[in-house]
Each structure stands twice: as C-alpha cells, then as structure tokens.
C-alpha cells in the first residue's frame, strides 16, 4: 500500500491532536497556549485537504476524519476556553452551572460540520460561519481582550449571549465567501481583496484582538454582500 495514501489522514490526526492539546491548556486557564494550538490545528486543517487533492488520494474516511478533528479543534477547544473564562466570573452569574452552556457551541460546530459534508452548495463558498473562523474569533477575543471582558459583570453576560449568536451563525443559511480564487484579477474578487487589505490595519492596531475583529468584519462583509 502506497505511503502517500496515509499522508492526508496523518495531517488530519495532527489537527486533532492539536485540538486535544488546546483543550488541555484551556482547562488549565492558559488561554494563549490554547489559542496557539488552535491556530496550529488550523494550519494542519488547511494542508490535509490540499495534500489529498495534490496526491489524488481523497477518500470518504478522510472526509469523516477531518470533521471529527475539526470538531475537537474548532468546536470543543474554543468551548473549553469559554467555559474556563465564564467560570472565572461565576460570582456574577445567577446560576453556577451557566458556564457549561459554552459547550453548546461544540454541539453546533458538529452540526455545522455535518451539514457541510452533505451540502453541495459550498464548493466555492460557505453557508453559515466556518468552524475555524468561529474558533479563532473566540480564542483571540478571550486572549486579547480578556482583561477588559472581566472589568464588568455585564460583559460576562455579553459573552454568554455571544455564544448563542455564534451557534446561530454556524448553522444559519447565510452565504459567506471563501478565500478561494479562480483567477487573480480584481473583477469577481473585489470582496476578497477588500477583506484581505483591511485585515492588515486591524492586526496592526489591535494585535491579537484584531483577529477577532477580522472574523467579525468577515461576517459583516458576507452579510452585506450576500447574493439572494
């Protein structure tokens, strides 16, 4: 059996392992390391599909494995970060079990991935918020703006509400563009180029929090430019 057949699945497993490590550090309260491994998982997620296409070894097993890995790295790991964050503000919440609501996002991430596997409309774009984008938003927000978010009890409620907004966006029938180019010209790629150009100042000004701002801008840009 050719070894190249196993390369994409090996990369996918590296994504899954990265998600497990991210989850561990999230529960330890070391959110920056957790975010780092979510980003590492996203890199592996990018290259597993690319390697499968380049090597011509795509398979149904690889597709299912990819979804399982993605739910760990982009569903469970960010949920763990949010759980640990909300747990820190438990004195401000009316019920002590409310931080567990963070794990609802992991369930909706799994549902979004299952829909993606069956939806043939998402070849050049997305329907609903991609799980990596959602994970990077929450990871970057908590790491970059964690001190500010803990400055007021009301901000804990804002995060709590944000979790449910994320769950909705993951499965919503909202077209969102993908950074896939059929050609490199401006015409037809205007939205993608505008998005990429605006990412630079956001990162330069806001640092890690800029990554969360970029995802929020991605959602807004997708909504205002969606085609009915």
Image: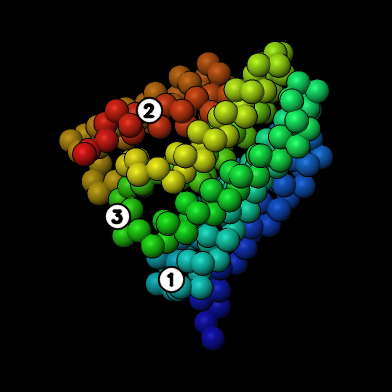
Task: Quadrant for the C terminus, please.
Answer: top left
- Report if the CB atoms under discs 1 and 2 are less than 8 Å apart: no
Say what secondary structure mark 3 lies in.
Answer: loop
Gap in angstroms between the C-alphas marked 1 and 2: 33 Å
Residue topped by disc 2:
220
Q: Is residue 219 left or right of residue 35?
A: left
Q: Which of marks 3 and 1 is nearer the N terminus?
A: 1
For mark 1, does the 10 Å Cα neighbourhood hold few (<14), some (14 to 19), or many (20 or more) residues?
some
Q: Which of marks 2 and 3 is nearer the N terminus?
A: 3
Instruction: Give the percent coordinates (x, y) of residue 171.
Output: 44, 46
* Residue 81 placement: quadrant: top right
* Residue 184 placement: quadrant: top left
The residue most toward the front is: 94
In the image, what residue occupies the spot 57% across and 34% down?
163
- Report if the CB atoms under discs 3 and 1 are less than 8 Å apart: no
Task: Quadrant for the N terminus, please.
Answer: bottom right
In the image, what residue occupies the spot 39% across and 23% down?
198
For mark 2, does the 10 Å Cα neighbourhood hold few (<14), some (14 to 19), or many (20 or more) residues?
few
Residue topped by disc 1:
58
Looking at the image, is 142 positioned above or below residue 135?
A: above
Gap in angstroms between the C-alphas marked 3 and 1: 19 Å
């Amino acid at each position: 059996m050719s070894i190249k057949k196993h390369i994409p699945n090996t990369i996918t497993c590296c994504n899954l392992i990265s998600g497990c490590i991210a989850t561990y550090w999230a529960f330890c309260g070391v959110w920056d390391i957790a975010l780092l491994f979510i980003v590492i998982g996203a890199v592996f997620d990018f290259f597993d599909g690319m390697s499968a296409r380049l090597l011509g070894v795509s398979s149904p097993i690889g597709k299912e494995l990819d979804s399982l890995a993605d739910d760990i790295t982009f569903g469970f790991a960010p949920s763990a970060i949010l759980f640990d964050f909300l747990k820190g503000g438990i004195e401000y919440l009316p019920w002590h079990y409310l931080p567990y609501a963070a794990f609802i996002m992991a369930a909706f991430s799994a549902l979004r991935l299952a829909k993606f596997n069956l939806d043939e409309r998402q070849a050049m774009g997305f329907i609903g918020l991609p799980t990596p984008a959602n994970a990077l938003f929450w990871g970057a927000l908590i790491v970059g703006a964690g001190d500010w978010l803990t400055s007021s009890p009301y901000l804990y409620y804002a995060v709590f509400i944000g979790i449910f907004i994320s769950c909705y966006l993951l499965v919503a029938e909202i077209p969102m563009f993908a950074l896939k180019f059929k050609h490199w010209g401006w015409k037809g790629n205007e939205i993608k180029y505008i998005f990429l150009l605006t990412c630079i100042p956001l990162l330069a000004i806001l640092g890690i929090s800029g990554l969360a701002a970029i995802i929020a801008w991605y959602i807004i840009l997708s909504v205002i430019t969606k085609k009915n």
